[in-house]
Image (spheres, rainbow, N blue to C red):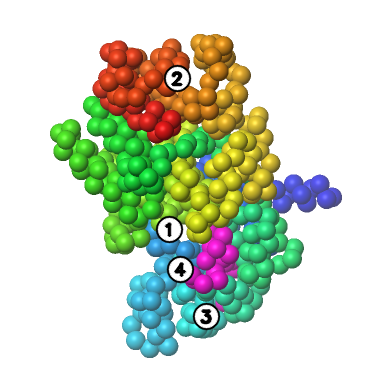
Amino acid sequence: MDVCVDKFLFLDFSLKTKIALAEINKEKNQTYSYLKHLQVQAVKSALNGETLVVLPTGYGKSLIYELIPKMTNQKAIVISPLNSIISEQVTKKGNTAIWITDTVLNDLAWNGVGPKTEQVTSLMSGKVTHIFGHPEILVSKQFLEIVRDNLCDTVGYVFVDEAHCVVNWGCQFRPDYQKLSKLKSVIRGVVFVAMTATATHRMQHEILEKLCMSKSTTVVQTSNIRANIKFNIVKRQPSTGKTSAEESFETIVLPLLKELCTDNNDDFPRTIVYSKLKYCALGYELAHKVSMKSNTQIMDSISQYHAPSTSSMKEKLVQEMGHPSSKLKLLFATEAYSMGTDAPNIRRIVHIGPPSSLDTYMQEVGRGGRDGEDCDALLYYNASDIGKNVTSMMPEVCEFCISNTCRRTFLGMHFGMQHDHDTVSLHRCCDICADICSCDTCLAKRDIVDYDDQLTSDQISLSSALSSYFDAENRSNENKITGLTDELLTTIIKSSPKLSSKDDVARLCGDLQDLFIDNIYILISTVTK
């Protein structure tokens, strides 16, 4: 009998899921045909009670809160931290979603008199299935009264998107994040579902506590360290002494700009460069100078995203980055461009200086490879970036930078997730594991190296940096002969102590393109000095 009941429940769930997916496909012109394993687990869990969902960036957490209202015929309140996230979701859902702004809130509080706007009519009539907003609006006395008087019987779920903000922002920056449980006082039996891509075990407990979620809350989670991202950490030039902070920044950005200037910039891997605000502007200024000097039109391919940008500029940029065929190739950004932004084909994430926390790092790295294709993450740091006087950075970020263990293993231990090396080849894992990879390709590369010559630590670092650069150029020029061979790599590494000028590199590399010679020299200067 129990077997028959279980089979019936499975068929009922499967049928409801297919119907809901079909409706979403019709509304959004999508082609969802199935759910991933942990999406299924999350939806099933949420249908049975309160749930904490910890899944990687790009896994499809938003589909979970799209499905459940359609499967239950109940409305959902979705709490989100950023305008860009809400705008994107409301645009996708059309007239089945409403964004509760101050203006809409005033329209809702008509007290039964006066004309009703189209949005108010849609919300009260049942057309609206998703109610989006910031915590500051959704826990306001005015909104809580509206819910109590008009919506308490139709709202079944509260989804807290980017739930790590409850902990990271809830104390001082946005204290209303710690008041979200007020919604439980006006909606009897409402189910809370918290969702994030980055939460240590300690943070998970804090989220549940601050949201007053049930002790029987189910946690659906997997490793937030995606297999298609290779983690690389590289020392950059000092920011003090003979080299200024601006010059240190330029040694990383100039090769990217020169690469973009080549005739084949259509093959330039879409790249996000994360840095502090003032360096976003510096990167954009450098792009202007390089464009004018090289007489190339690259500025249409470059933009910047940061907090001072206007809301309309941010919204336009998010939409442009989300379009696979966009001309935009290089984005200078602060951490303002992270949570919820969905650009499918980012192939390279560059950090010039480490972020403040590993949570932030994973959110930003998670912008890359969201379509499942490979993405390289490069974090550049120097002693000034991780000095003891840097109080705005969590200590584990410094440990991550200087560690000589597998980057994935380190991140896995921090987030309480075990990394399975079988899921990714060593040379695509991180810079540490790439040095010990024993696949045929890597062994062939090592056979070229004369191991009778003991390499210095600088030469080992240079080998890793040049190897990544050669691979990137060869992928971008797959139909052309670049001359960036394993033999040349070995020659450069052996000769690197004697290469003190660009002319030295040019003489060593023969007929190589000037762009390649410039970039090789910059890497040598950056890593070995």
Disc 4: which residue:
133
Disc 1: which residue:
85
From the top left corner, tell me how far across and down residue 449 is, in percent. 52, 13
Residue 520 visible at all: yes
User: SS class of the residue under badge 1?
Assistant: helix
From the top left corner, tell me how far across and down residue 272 is, in percent. 38, 43
Quadrant showing the C terminus: top left
* The image quarter in which residue 440 lies: top right
Nearer-N-terminus badge (3/2): 3
Establish if 421 lies above or below 193.
above
> Three-letter amino acid code at disc 3?
Leu
| Region of the chain picked out in magenta, as a range | 152-174
Nearer-N-terminus badge (1/3): 1
The residue carrying pointer 2 sits among few (fewer than 14), some (14 to 19) or many (20 or more) residues within 10 Å by Cα, namely many
Along the line of sight, which residue is nearer the eye, 528 or 179? Answer: 528
From the top left corner, tell me how far across and down residue 194 is, in percent. 60, 61
